[in-house]
Every structure is written in C-alpha cells, then in structure tokens.
Image (cartoon, helix red, strand yellow):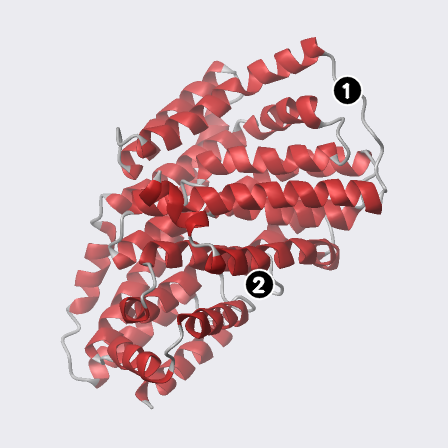
Amino acid sequence: MTSAIILLLLMGLLFLGVPVAFALGGLGLGMLWFADLSPLMVPQGLYSTTDSFILLAVPLFLLMSNILLKGGVGKDLFNAVQSWVGHWPGGLGVATILSCGIFAAISGSSVATAATIGTVAIKEMTDRGYQRPFVLGLMAAGGTLGILIPPSIPMIIYGVITEESIVDLFMAGVGPGLFLVATFILFCFGYAKFGGGYQPQAKAPMSERIQASKRALPTVLLAIVVIGSIYAGYATPTESAGIGFAFSLIIVFAMRAMTWEKLKQAITDSMRTTVTIFLILAGARVFGHAITLYRIPQELSFAITANISEPALFIFIVCVVLLLMGFFLEALSMLLIMVPVLYPSLASMGIDPIWFGVLFVIMIECALISPPVGLNLYVIQAVGKARLGEVVKGVWPFLLIMLGTVVLLYWFPDLALYIPFKL
C-alpha cells in the first residue's frame, strides 16, 4: 500500500509539471521527514552524487560531442560515407545510418547524434526525392544509436546505480548496436526497392571519395581511440572521455572549423546539460535513500519473486511498463526511477544485470522516439523544421524494429554478452 501511495504521489508531481529533479528530491525529503528520519541525508546525497570519478565521464563526453557538433564534423563524416555508398539503392539512407553509428561511437548522446547528422542528412535526402516522413523517422531512430553504441551516458549512469562494470556494459552494447545499424540499413534497401520516391545518385569518382575520406579520417580515428582505449584496458571510461575531449579540440581547431565563440557555446551547452543530469541524479539519490529506508525495493522484489516465477514474464512486464512510462517521462528519469527498484529482483530471477542493462537502454531508445514526450522527435522536428506528426509517421517502422531486437535479445542473450564475456 505504501509503495502505491508513493508511486501515485510521484506521478502526480510529474503530471503537475514539477521538474523531475525536484519531484524526486522533494518527495524523498518529505518521506524522510514523515518517518522522522534525519534530513542530513539530503546534503550527503547531493555531495555523494557529484563526488564520483566515474560520473566525470558524463560532462567530458558531452563536451566532446558538443565541440564536434559546433565544429561541423557531421558534414564531413556524412559526405565521406555517402561518397562510398550514396549510389546504392537507398544509399543516402545507408549513409545516414552509418554516419549515426560512427558518431554514436564518439558522443554517447542520442540528442547530439541526431542533431549533428540531421543538420546535413535531412536536406540531402529530401533534395534527392526521399519522402519527408521517412527521412525524419530515419534520423530520429538513427540518433538513438548514440546511447546504445558505446560510449553511452545512460550506461554510465546505470553502472553507477548498480555498481556493475561500465566497461562490460559498453562492450555488451556493441553487438545489439551493430545489429540495429544492419537492420536499419536493410530497411533502407527495402524502402528503396518497394517504396520508391528517391532519385538514384551517380557513383562518386575515386578522387572525390579519397578527398572526402581524408576530411572524415580524424573523426573515425577519434572513435577508434575512444572505444579502443576502453576495450583494450588502456583507459577507464572517464580517462577515455578526457582523451576524446582533448583530441576533439585538436581536430576542430586543426581543421579551422572552430571559433572561440563556438567553443564558448559548446561549453555552455555542455554545462547546462550536465547540471540538469546531475540535479536529476541528486534528486534520485535522495529518493533512493528514502525508498530504501521504507524497504520498498525489498518489498517489491519479494512481491515479484512470490508472484512471478518466469523470467520471461518479468521481462515482458518490465518492457510494457517502460513503454508506458516513455509516453510521459524522458529517458534519464525512467532509468533513475526504475533501476533501483528492479535491480534487487534480477538475482532471484537469474537475469544477468549486464544483459538487463542493455535491454533497458534499448527500451529507453524506444521511449526516445515514442510520442508525446520522445526527445528525439522534438530534436528532429526542430532540425528539419517539420511538424511533429510527420516525424511520428516516419518513425513507427523503426520503433517496431527496436522492439523486435528486444525479443531477439531475449532469445539470444549472446547478442549482448558474447563480446564482453566470450570474446
């Protein structure tokens, strides 16, 4: 009964428009006060949230992605990829997805990926006759790869909450991430063959391909350095983020694509996003302390194990709840509200927490392109100067592909677990 009341209060605050950070922190403080517990947990929670070497990776990855965004790196990357595959059926769509995949391996941010590639790809594709809803939906879905292909900011936060290895989480995201890239590409081929509505593009001459590739080579090398240093064990995710940030500065200034004004804007945007994330984390930490003292996670875990004996049913219920929550909550809030409650039940269900983290992130991806709150829908709406209905119309096939990937991941766990544990 207590759990239901607290959940209703939280949902009520969110529906009233109270910012997520203050809804979580305020409700947690109220619960502590009502139980006559020390409110000193609040400043302690705020301090412990920011006092984390692992979380330092978040602002560094945000800085790196914003610097690359302001430096116009997305244009060079897209031009290089499309020079090689643009003449294929649906080639510009393929180039868009590949560009999103490469940039995702640098940024760790869905919004940065969608905005960076979208500013170039949307105009190129619509000029070539691709139907506008398809283009907008492709960009919104392609942008979500930014939080699945490592480095991933939600995976960093999941690792902090659960104290699981962030390196293992990153590596577990590679398989499903590449699978989604391949599936999106196959859909682009199918669209070109059966949907039509595009103008075939002439094959670029080799000189143009080489020139475009040279322009994009530093960005590709940056992705290799960021991911390779983590996978090889040479750097922690935080150290890798610092290396990536330094190299991104060198790249944009060496290419003369950055000004001090743009750099200032990139730092300001990163600071705003970082403050927002850390405030939500601090509020969630206070709320997490409160619900733990009220023994809500333990009671819920007991209720789940007592009434749900099949892991498949548990996963199905979790996915349905996340889909419903995605209608009115943004991705980070879902992560911070649900993971502390669900995590204690994983061991009793025999569910690998690394595998569950990947599944959770894919469901967050679905939330990012689910109306009415899907953040990527609004990013692409703004970038493409489109109506929200156009974006939603084009995105639903990709949403079905993502949900199909969740089903496949359940039946073939090695899609996520092979690289971190068996390779």
Tell me the amino acid under the disc marked 1. Lys
Name the residue carrying label 2.
373
Tell me the amino acid under the disc marked 2. Val
Q: From this viewpoint, is residue 265 visible?
A: no
Q: Going 57% across and 60% down the picture, which residue do you hit?
A: 403
In the image, 340 versus 313, the foreground residue is: 313
Q: In whole angstroms, how far apart are the C-alphas of marks 1 and 2?
A: 40 Å
Name the residue carrying label 1.
203
Task: Assess whether mark 2 and mark 1 are in contact (beta carbons under 8 angstroms).
Answer: no
Nearer to us of marks 1 and 2 is: 1
Q: Residue 334's image quarter?
A: bottom left
Q: Give the structural element (helix, strand or loop) at label 1.
A: loop
Q: Going 54% across and 37% down the picture, which residue do you hit?
A: 101
Q: Going 75% across and 55% down the picture, which residue do you hit?
A: 390
Q: Is residue 368 left or right of residue 159?
A: right
Residue 337's disc number: none
In the image, 263 versus 338, the foreground residue is: 338
Q: Residue 316: x and y, percent?
A: 48, 71
| Position above or below: 157 against 238 | below
| Position above or below: 353 against 102 | below
